Image (tube, rainbow, N blue to C red):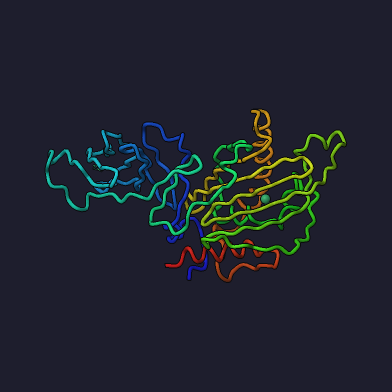
Amino acid sequence: MTSWLNNISPGLAAAWHPVLRSSDLGETSRRIDLLGEPWVITRLNGSFTAFVDKCPHRNARLSDGMVVGDTLQCPYHGWRFDGTGHCTLIPALGVGATVPPTAQLKPAHVTERYDLIWIAPETPRAEIIDIAEWTDDSLHKVWMPAIDINATAAQFIDNFLDFGHFPFVHAGTFGSAEDSNISDYNVDKTNDGWGFIVDYPHSIANKEDPLVASGQHPLVQPRNMVYTFQAPFSANLHLELPLTGVVNAIATFCQPMTESTTRLYTVMLRSDGASATAAQAAIEYEYSVLQEDLVVIEHLWDNEIALGVGQAHSRADRNTVEFRRILARLLEP
Ligand code: FES
Ligand SMILES: [Fe+2]
């Protein structure tokens, strides 16, 4: 069994990963990093297509090439590949010439969800996370800019799911009123076995509430918090503040780029996000919360999390222990 997990653990190939905002793929190809490898994302014959960004001829970057008809043309000797990865033309041999069987690219599985392009290099084992709030018309979608961090996707999700760190790491934002004591809570597996839900009501310092300054609302307010996790690296945090009536779901999807860097795509689905001013305020607040987390997780000693022995756990960590169990299963051959 794999005992440690990082961004390039081989088993992660059999999973969906977000690689690009759909709107960021124009007419040209884009180069992205996933699981320590460069990939080219392009649109061929109307469909999103993803290949490892290396021409099988002499390793040129296909992402520097161009789309010609329904094919991607390599910038070096002009070999053309269709959406299935089949080489349709070697210009040096002329039209109709026999193409060597090794002149072939292997396409990844590609799909679009939540305005993101997702790819799976091998047949994915788990479905993409279900974000129920996505189709709720009472909630406004507020996208954070994509953010690159110097930590692995597993370290980021481990932190995202963890609530024992609030009073220590988030004392500058919402965590100042947090009781460091974690009450018992349940980790309920989702039906497909690749995720879980944790319901944890608690209290926070609500620094986003404008009525706190005028004394109409107390700073410390109850907050209902429901986490949904789905393998490998997606999570949704549904927050409800009964005093203000605000609903805010924070959905976060990680792209493990290199061995130690990860791109975060985060969308907030907020009841109070209608105006540009409110949306910007929400982005800035969430960004300040993220910065508090990054101070710690970008300073962890290594790029791995233990899936078996190797890290100590307490009863308060049962959600992040379940996270490790699910990932260990995902990585099993
Ligand atoms: S390296 Fe791509 S065609 Fe030669
Ligand atoms: Fe945090």
Q: Is residue 60 left or right of residue 176?
A: left
Counting labels gives 0
Comparing 141 with 96, the one in front is 141
Q: Position of residue 48 (x, y in %)?
A: 37, 41
Report the residue at 37% width, 36% height from top: 29
Comparing 140 with 36, the one in front is 140
Q: Position of residue 254 (x, y in %)?
A: 53, 49
- Quadrant where the C terminus is found in the figure: bottom left
Comparing 293 with 212, the one in front is 212
Report the residue at 66% width, 67% height from top: 313
Residue 93 position (above or below residue 256): above
Q: Quadrant of residue 314?
A: bottom right
Residue 122 position (above or below residue 240): below
Report the residue at 69% width, 38% height from top: 285
Q: Residue furthest top?
A: 276
Residue 95 position (above or below residue 57): above
